[in-house]
Image (cartoon, rainbow, N blue to C red):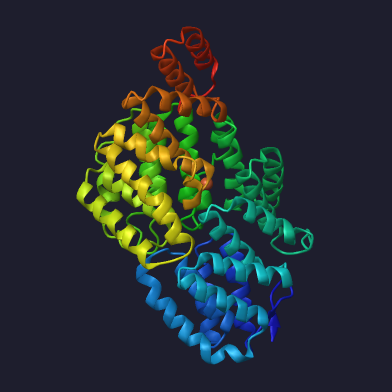
């Protein structure tokens, strides 16, 4: 028996294996590419090390690719003969892995919460709970669970900065921007390479319309993040949003071409960043050339995955935006089959929100704006249930606004823009669209006031 750097027992007879597993957690929380290698090294030294096998399963599932499920099941088979010697914490991790592998993310989160109640310093359980709660759109749960362990953490516990960075993100998603920024900046001060904490502050700057500060906050070079894992593409996506808000489309496109593209990666492909940026550039009127092609080709390979509703939404967006409507429809049909054959959060979110959302996106890309507006209107306030952040889901709000404007559905457009100029008051484009709609409705005085707000607004985009 050994212990990790926070004093939690590791059931292994190999000191080397224990050291490697500890390092795997440290590197994973630091978004380093070396994390999985340390799990492998731990298993070379102790092939029956339950927690190392379990973390191998976790790392495989993080790839969010249905093709890896057989490997995860094989890992669970390797765990079972060794389970009797494991601690209750380790056995709970295995139950969480089983639940996650079976697609029951809520049950996996419940197991991680049980672990954290007993062992608040279990950083892996906390990070996984944080990540999967984010993907399930459960911001309040994310915040509550981190708050529930914070009392046991302080500067003496290795990895405290990571917890601060996570708490910052949870606060941001709950709208507590000032507190989020304070916690996030403290975390980055502690560990300037903590991409998640850097990203938490970027979210605050995004939500508060502080893109000029955002450009400065993310003024890193690719070399500074050379050893970071593909999550860095998402942080570059935030940098691209800041450029977009500043009207600097060339730099946003340059980031797309040089920092965001993961389609050629063998291990991890995140179409979400790329599709979301391309669509935002298009909505801003930028010519993006044939960039949808590669995303649609990759998305076509993933239409039966259904690992996360949030990913499905972006696969479908890429297919529809490229004009592959038949494939997009097959994708939606596959979602419906998946929802009918499954139960729990993924099935419900897919059936109730994801499918109408995707049907709306397909109608929008086909130019059927009336139909798109009607479909998207029904789910506009429910999209949180497919997960992702406020900043990410804002793309769907932009699409429905555009659909309403193009469909000349003035009541819907006025309603959507009235809300938008409050939540995104720093963007000229929102005020201009609002003024346009008010003019069409004959509300000249308020339209003039909106135009004045557009003049004074500090940011360009929507
Ligand atoms: Fe983000």
Residue drawn at x 56%, y 27% is 422
**Quadrant the N terminus occupies:** bottom right
In the image, residue 453 lies at what x, y percent? Answer: 54, 15
Asked whether residue 6 is in view, the answer is no
Asked whether residue 24 is in view, the answer is yes
Toward the viewer: 456 or 346? 346
Instruction: Say if 435 sits above or below 82 in the image.
Output: above
Task: Using residue 110 as the reference point, say whether residue 448 is left or right of it.
Answer: left
Instruction: Say if 258 sits above or below 427 in the image.
Output: below
Toward the viewer: 21 or 50? 50
In the image, residue 405 lies at what x, y percent? Answer: 36, 25
In the image, residue 280 lies at what x, y percent? Answer: 39, 35
Task: Using residue 127 as the reference point, say whether residue 298 is left or right of it.
Answer: left
Task: Using residue 191 as the reference point, say whether residue 283 is left or right of it.
Answer: left
Instruction: Say if 39 sits above or below 134 in the image.
Output: below
Toward the viewer: 232 or 297? 297
In the image, residue 27 lies at what x, y percent? Answer: 58, 64
């Amino acid at each position: 028996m050994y212990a990790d750097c926070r004093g939690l027992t590791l059931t292994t007879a190999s000191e080397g294996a224990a050291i490697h597993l500890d390092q795997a957690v440290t590197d994973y929380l630091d978004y380093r590419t070396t994390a999985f290698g340390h799990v492998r090294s731990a298993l070379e030294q102790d092939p029956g090390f339950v927690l190392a096998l379990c973390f191998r399963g976790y790392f495989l599932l993080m790839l969010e690719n249905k093709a890896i499920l057989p490997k995860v099941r094989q890992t669970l088979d390797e765990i079972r003969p060794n389970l009797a010697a494991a601690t209750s914490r380790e056995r709970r991790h295995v139950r969480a892995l089983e639940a996650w592998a079976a697609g029951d993310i809520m049950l996996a989160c419940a197991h991680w919460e049980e672990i954290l109640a007993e062992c608040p310093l279990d950083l892996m359980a906390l990070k996984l709970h944080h990540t999967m709660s984010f993907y399930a759109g459960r911001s309040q749960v994310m915040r509550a669970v981190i708050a529930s362990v914070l009392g046991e953490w302080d500067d003496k516990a290795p990895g405290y900065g990571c917890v601060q960075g996570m708490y910052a993100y949870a606060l941001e998603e709950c709208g507590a921007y000032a507190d989020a920024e304070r916690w996030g900046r403290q975390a980055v001060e502690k560990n300037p390479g903590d991409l998640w904490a850097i990203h938490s502050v970027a979210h605050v700057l995004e939500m508060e319309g502080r893109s000029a500060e955002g450009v400065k906050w993310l003024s890193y070079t690719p070399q500074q993040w050379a050893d970071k894992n593909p999550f860095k593409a998402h942080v570059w996506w935030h940098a691209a949003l800041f450029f977009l808000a500043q009207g600097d489309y060339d730099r946003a496109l340059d980031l797309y071409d040089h920092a965001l593209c993961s389609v050629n990666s063998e291990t991890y492909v995140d179409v979400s960043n790329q599709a979301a940026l391309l669509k935002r550039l298009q909505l801003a009127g930028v010519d993006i050339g044939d960039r949808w092609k590669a995303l649609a080709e990759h998305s076509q390979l993933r239409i039966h995955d259904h690992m996360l509703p949030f990913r499905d939404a972006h696969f479908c967006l890429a297919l529809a935006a490229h004009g592959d409507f038949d494939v997009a429809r097959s994708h939606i049909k596959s979602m419906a089959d998946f929802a009918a054959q499954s139960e729990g959060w993924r099935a419900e979110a897919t059936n109730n929100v994801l499918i109408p959302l995707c049907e709306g996106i397909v109608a929008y890309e086909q130019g059927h704006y009336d139909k798109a507006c009607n479909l998207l209107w029904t789910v506009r306030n429910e999209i949180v249930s497919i997960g992702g952040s406020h900043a990410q889901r804002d793309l769907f709000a932009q699409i429905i606004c555009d659909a309403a404007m193009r469909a000349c559905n003035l009541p819907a457009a006025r309603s959507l823009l009235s809300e938008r100029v409050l939540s995104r008051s720093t963007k000229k484009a929102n005020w201009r669209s609002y003024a346009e709609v008010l003019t069409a409705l004959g509300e000249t005085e308020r339209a003039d006031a909106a135009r004045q707000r557009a003049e004074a607004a500090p940011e360009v985009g929507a």
